[in-house]
Image: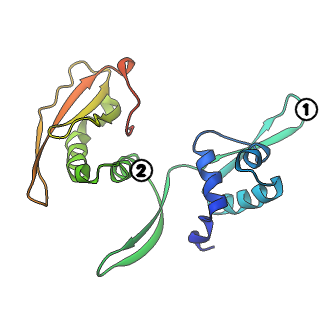
Amino acid sequence: MEQETLFTASKWVILKLLSQRSLSPIELAAASNTSVANVSQQLRLLEMAGLVKSERVPNRDKGQPRILYSLAGNNSFLIATTDDFVQKKLFKLSAFNKIILKIWFYDKPELHYSLEKAFWHIEQHLDKIDALAVDKSAGNPINMILFTRDEKLKLNPLAVSCPDGSKRQVAFIATHPDKAEPAVFET
């Protein structure tokens, strides 16, 4: 099955809804304002492609099992078009890939390169970090907040020379997860 046929508007709505929580076909139909038959057909295709999974759960109200659907892991369908390379592929994402993608989707493209460099700079400490966030109000330096339970984790600022010739500083601010604000991207 060609993957791009999986990303029609109706399937995209289902995937977005399932990114929030597991849902039954009835709940998905109500939330997407369509029929259960249509949702069930879309779910079968998404399940065959490995993007969603189903789970039978007991329905206490009626005593009959019902099916809940959820996303089947971390995937990315990447379409690349460059001057000398065109390719498309469905990837299973590692935790590292997931963070890099979240950086690429960050709404300040001028910071992408610096944030990638900062992420690779802290890579060896990821086992001590519960979540990462970027202070959206900061420009230079960029403040990367590290939510950690390790009170000894201290990182020196990073100087980044960007491809466009500009220079940015990245400051790493360690804080306890209990003080966490909504994270821009999580580990």
Specify the label residue 63 is tagged with.
1
Q: In this view, does 77 lie above or below 72?
A: below
Q: In which quarter of the image is the C terminus?
A: top left
Q: Give percent across and percent down for residue 149.
A: 32, 20
Instruction: Say whether disc 2 or disc 1 marks the residue closer to the N-terminus.
Output: 1
Q: Residue at x 26, y 35 (%)?
A: 137
Relative depth, front residue between 70 and 104 = 104
| Residue 64 x/y as whole percent | 89, 37
Counting from the top left corner in percent of width and height, residue 135 is at 28, 34
Q: What's the residue at 62%, 62% (across, down)?
A: 9
Cα distance between the residues tagged 2 and 1 = 39 Å
Q: Is mark 1 on a helix, strand or loop?
A: loop
Residue 12 or residue 85, whichever sits in front: 12
- The image's mark for residue 128 is none
**Residue 186 vertical position relative to residue 116 in the rendered view, above or below:** above
Q: What residue type is labelled 1?
A: Gly
Residue at (38% x, 78% y) in the render:
86
Specify the label residue 94 is tagged with: 2
Front residue of this view, candidates 98 and 179: 179
Instruction: Check the picture and name the quadrant holding the N terminus.
Output: bottom right
Q: Position of residue 100 (x, y in %)?
A: 34, 51
Examine the rendered structure and indicate whether residue 153 appears above or below residue 42: above
Kind of residue at disc 2:
Ser
